[in-house]
């Protein structure tokens, strides 16, 4: 899959495809007008030859401009040269007192090609050359000729400026998407690390301090590595977006009730779910189970491995509600804010971050009665 590979060239490709359609329309218009004004030609055969040149060049330009590799500056210059040559040939083919040139509005094609390829500077140069040549081959300048010349002069730089602006906007959009995905990947990795490595290091540090002796040294080392790893997570500003080796089907579903029931195998954990299956997208089920597992991990670490915990799942037509409760001493005031400032991402990322990404809410109630999480996730979460 191509991501952010060439935003400027993508914009240019789309504009040249649109110009290709315009070339055909203006060619048909020029052929019709020249056929209608056939009696104005002093040299009819030369007029037919000019029209054939326009047809052949239009076909050539459509093929060349469709391939970015062939879209060389010399060909864009040749495109303008052909247009100027047809303008110069108009008085020879039609006579000195002609009113309309042979190419007519077809001259806009080369002008717009310069504007797309070389932006406003190229558009301005092509406008001056086309408009100046159109005036030089005429005997007199009428009000109508002046109006056409004025439109040619402003069309090139305006279209060129718009093309340059679109390319810049496409580049900025891709950079913003890259930054957003990098932030999301960083948050996902932080959650994964917290759910595994950091929890184990914190447990080793705590148990080592309780046991003393060599175990205390081991706990101290685990604590140091835990702090280093937390600092690394917090200081990571960007992470390259990586793609999974096997993409999960978008319509895959899983039973949340069954997945939560497996958490009941943990010691001292009671899980209550509806008697029927609660089907949600498989990715959503994994995230919800990870949130509940993080809550239970906090109970085991901060209350004790033998502390009881209860999980209650309720399913509604538009949402699912989860309650994770324990009877510990509760969380001291300001402790969560201090943990977030220290880089401890258990609550802010593993719990609240996951639920927020699913479009849900996570409310915490804590005190001397214990700690209870109320989690609400919409059915349409993705």
Image (spheres, rainbow, N blue to C red):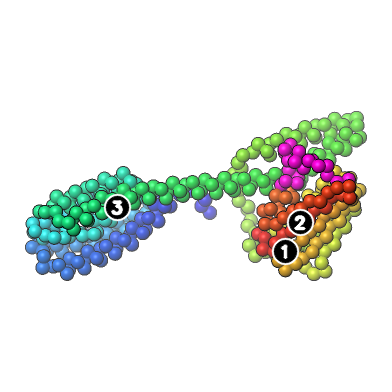
Q: Where residue 108 appears, x then y in whole percent?
A: 26, 56
User: Which element type, helix, strand or loop, lies under badge 3?
Assistant: helix
Q: Where residue 378 appears, x then y in whole percent?
A: 70, 61
Judge left or right: residue 165 versus residue 109: right
Residue 91: image quadrant is bottom left
Q: Circle 3 is placed at which residue position? A: 155
Residue 301 visible here = no
Which residue lies at the image location 16% right of the left edge and 60% below the top edge?
100
Ranked by sequence position, the earlier of labels 3 and 1 is: 3
Which residue lies at the image location 37% right of the left edge and 58% below the top edge?
17
Check if residue 343 falls in the magenta segment: yes
Ranked by sequence position, the earlier of labels 2 and 1 is: 1
Above/below status of 95 relative to 166: below
Q: Nearer the viewer, residue 305 or 370?
A: 370
Q: Circle 2 is placed at which residue position? A: 375
Ranked by sequence position, the earlier of labels 3 and 2 is: 3
Q: Where residue 222 appears, x then y in whole percent?
A: 80, 35
User: Which element type, helix, strand or loop, lies under badge 1?
Assistant: strand
Q: What stretch is highlighted in magenta?
A: 329-349
As measured in the structure, the alpha-carbon distance from the residue carrying label 3 to the one carrying label 2 is 58 Å
Q: Where residue 369 appears, x then y in whole percent?
A: 89, 50
User: Which element type, helix, strand or loop, lies under badge 2?
Assistant: strand
Which residue lies at the image location 34% right of the left edge and 51% below the top edge?
159
Check if residue 169 falls in the magenta segment: no
Q: Residue 377 carries which label?
A: none
Q: Circle 1 is placed at which residue position? A: 319
Above/below status of 29 relative to 217: below
As measured in the structure, the alpha-carbon distance from the residue carrying label 2 to the one carrying label 1 is 10 Å
């Amino acid at each position: 899959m191509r991501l952010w590979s060439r935003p400027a060239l993508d914009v240019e490709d789309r504009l040249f495809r649109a110009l290709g359609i315009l070339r055909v329309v203006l060619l048909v218009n020029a052929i019709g007008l020249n056929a209608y004004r056939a009696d104005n030609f002093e040299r009819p055969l030369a007029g037919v030859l000019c029209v054939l040149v326009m047809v052949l060049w239009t076909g050539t330009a459509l093929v060349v401009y469709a391939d970015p590799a062939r879209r060389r500056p010399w060909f864009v210059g040749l495109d303008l040269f052909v247009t100027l040559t047809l303008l110069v040939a108009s008085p020879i083919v039609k006579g000195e007192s002609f009113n309309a040139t042979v190419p007519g509005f077809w001259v806009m094609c080369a002008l717009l090609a310069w504007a797309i390829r070389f932006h406003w500077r190229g558009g301005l140069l092509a406008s001056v050359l086309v408009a100046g040549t159109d005036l030089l081959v005429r005997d007199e300048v009428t009000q109508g000729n002046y109006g056409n010349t004025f439109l040619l002069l402003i069309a090139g730089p305006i279209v060129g400026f718009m093309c340059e602006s679109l390319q810049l906007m496409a580049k900025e959009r891709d950079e913003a998407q890259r930054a957003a995905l990098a932030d999301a990947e960083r948050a996902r990795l932080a959650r994964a690390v917290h759910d595994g490595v950091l929890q184990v290091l914190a447990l080793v540090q705590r148990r080592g301090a309780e046991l003393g002796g060599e175990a205390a040294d081991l706990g101290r080392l685990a604590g140091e590595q835990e702090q280093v790893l937390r600092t690394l997570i917090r200081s990571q500003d960007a992470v390259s977006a990586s793609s999974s080796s096997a993409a999960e089907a978008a319509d895959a579903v899983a039973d949340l009730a069954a997945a939560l029931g497996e958490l009941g195998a943990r010691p001292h954990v009671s899980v209550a779910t509806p008697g029927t299956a609660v089907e949600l997208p498989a990715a959503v089920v994994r995230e919800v189970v990870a949130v509940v597992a993080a809550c239970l991990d906090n109970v085991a670490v901060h209350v004790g491995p033998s502390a009881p915990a209860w999980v209650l799942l309720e399913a509604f037509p538009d949402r699912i509600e989860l309650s994770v409760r324990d009877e510990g001493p509760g969380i001291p005031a300001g402790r969560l804010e201090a943990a977030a400032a220290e880089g401890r991402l258990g609550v802010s990322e593993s719990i609240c971050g996951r639920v927020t990404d699913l479009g849900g809410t996570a409310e915490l109630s804590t005190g001397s009665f214990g700690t209870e999480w109320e989690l609400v996730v919409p059915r349409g979460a993705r």
